[in-house]
Amino acid sequence: IDIKDYSGKVVFDTSSLVIAAVGSEERRLDLADIVRRLHEKNIYVIVRIAVFQDQHFVRVRPNLAVRDPAGRIWRDRKGLGWVDPAAEEVWRYIVEVAREAAKAGVDELNFDYIRFPSDGNLSAIRYPVFDARTQTRREVLQQFFAYLTSELRDAGPVLSADLFGLATVREDDLGIGQVIEDALLYFDVVAPMVYPSHYARGFLGYKNPAAHPYEVVIYSLREAALRRQRLAMTLAGLLEESDVHAGAYAIGQIRPWLQGFNLGAPYPPRAIRSQIQAVSDAGLSAGWLLWSPSNRYHSASFESE
């Protein structure tokens, strides 16, 4: 359930003075009632919170908005504005939204757009808080992850983070601050968006990666699983040296987003089933998520031939 999407509107009843001060509440849902009814049907409830892409916050806190050299609100290719990922006021606000959702009894808090902008005229960006001379984008997100999870550990729900699919196979931060090991250290679940259509021409030697859903997904997830394994081994060694019990720390599980929409190639049920099979063949046991912007899904996508 989207409770705060790119618009920045918080679409359920809250009792938060912080949210009231921002003026972002737009009451469309009785979230607690929806959660109760879904739980009666044994449905696991995830709420999604878009973080640094927020059109409302850009308007009411323009001093924290990403700007262009002329001082105007900078916008990406879709015409959307962003808040500065280094702004701690934004961090506190996101925690407040998440806590209000936790009070409604949701099972999982899913954080999306936890990154720096990735498209548009990136050379024209001016950040009001972030200073590349003193810290990297990766360091900013590491600090945000640490703050977010430490503030919400006692809230109850599972904490999950959405990452670009390329974070599974690239060692750098993709220019947006995202490194999969960092997310695995702080979140219960990490959800890389391994949509084959989002991989560039030539990936794995394919002219059109979108036409090879099984191959793209299984390669990405095997790489992610290997990186998780290496991280676990490194962490275990460090804990042994420091005499800290390993049970005090946990590494997140990998649960990918799969492509359920036509882009780059047709995605009939067969293509969706091939991605689901890839998750299983990669040895991941935390499940998967499927997304289509139409929110329409064919039952044959979930049935074997």
Image: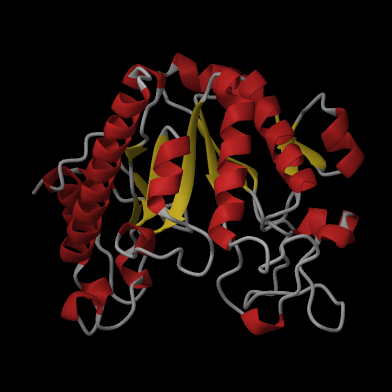
Q: Out of 27 and 49, give the one closest to the viewer.
A: 49
Q: Position of residue 127 (x, y in %)?
A: 75, 68
Identify the residue shown where x is 48% and y is 18%: 39
Q: Position of residue 102 (x, y in %)?
A: 62, 23
Name, please, the residue furthest toward the left.
305
57 vs 171: above or below: above
Q: Position of residue 242 (x, y in %)?
A: 37, 25
Whether residue 173 appears in this view of the structure is yes
Residue 128 in which image quadrant: bottom right
Q: Out of 36 and 199, give the one closest to the viewer.
A: 199
Whether residue 114 appears in this view of the structure is no
Q: Position of residue 51 (x, y in %)?
A: 64, 49
Q: Out of 125 and 43, give the one closest to the viewer.
A: 125
Identify the residue shown where x is 28% and y is 75%: 265
170 vs 181: above or below: below
Identify the residue shown where x is 87% and y is 43%: 22
159 vs 283: above or below: above
Identify the residue shown where x is 56% and y is 42%: 145
Name, please, the residue furthest toward the front.
241
